[in-house]
Image (spheres, grey):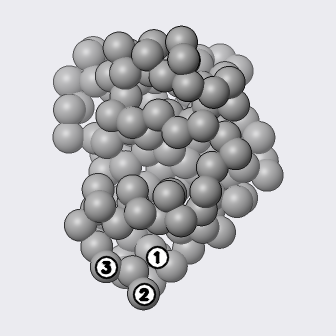
Amino acid sequence: MAKILIVDDEPHIRLLLEQILEDFEDEGVDILSCDNGKDAVEIIKQEKPDLIFLDILMPQMNGFDVCRAVKKELKMDDVYIILLTARGHGINMRKGIEAGADLCISKPFDPAEIIEHAVRVLGLEIN
């Protein structure tokens, strides 16, 4: 069963992503979420999600550190990480890719773009 993890310290962003991705549950995809990087790493170790939507600026452990932990320390290269940044492209985008993110998306994001990436990464067709 495919799994998506949403990690953001802003409750309204988590809820928005959950609503955008809710049709994936009809396809058997588990949607998990948490509000900080430290808990995210533990969930990632236990649940091994296929796709992670990961905020950069969070308490306890930022998104860059989570990326490094997953890709470089845990060697989980098959986990696709999409970093979400409110600070635009530039430096955060480059730092995200260097940390191991597969893709960086600026906030506010387009819901259709979120769905498109999830469909592609998970290899699903959502109607």
Q: CA distance from mark 2 to mark 3?
A: 7 Å
Q: Looking at the image, is mark 3 or mark 1 nearer the viewer?
A: 3
Label 3 sits on residue = 125
Dot 1 lies on which element?
helix
In screen coordinates, is 123 left or right of 49? left
Label 3 SS: loop
Q: Position of residue 122 (x, y in %)?
A: 28, 62
* Residue 84 x/y as whole percent: 57, 36
Marks 2 and 1: in contact by CB < 8 Å?
Answer: no
Circle 2 residues within 10 Å: few <14, some 14–19, many ≥20 = few
Which image quarter: residue 95?
top left
User: Which amino acid does the dot numbered 1 rest on?
Assistant: Glu
As drawn, the label of residue 25 is 1
Q: Nearer the viewer, residue 67 or 96?
A: 96
Q: Are marks 2 and 3 in contact (CB under 8 Å)?
A: yes
- Report the side of 86 relative to 55 (left or right): right
- Above-or-below relation of 29 to 108: below
Inspect the image, locate mark 3, and give the three-letter code of the amino acid beneath it: Glu
Q: Is residue 50 left or right of residue 35?
A: left
Image coordinates for residue 118, horizontal then vertical, percent? 39, 60
**Mark on residue 127?**
2
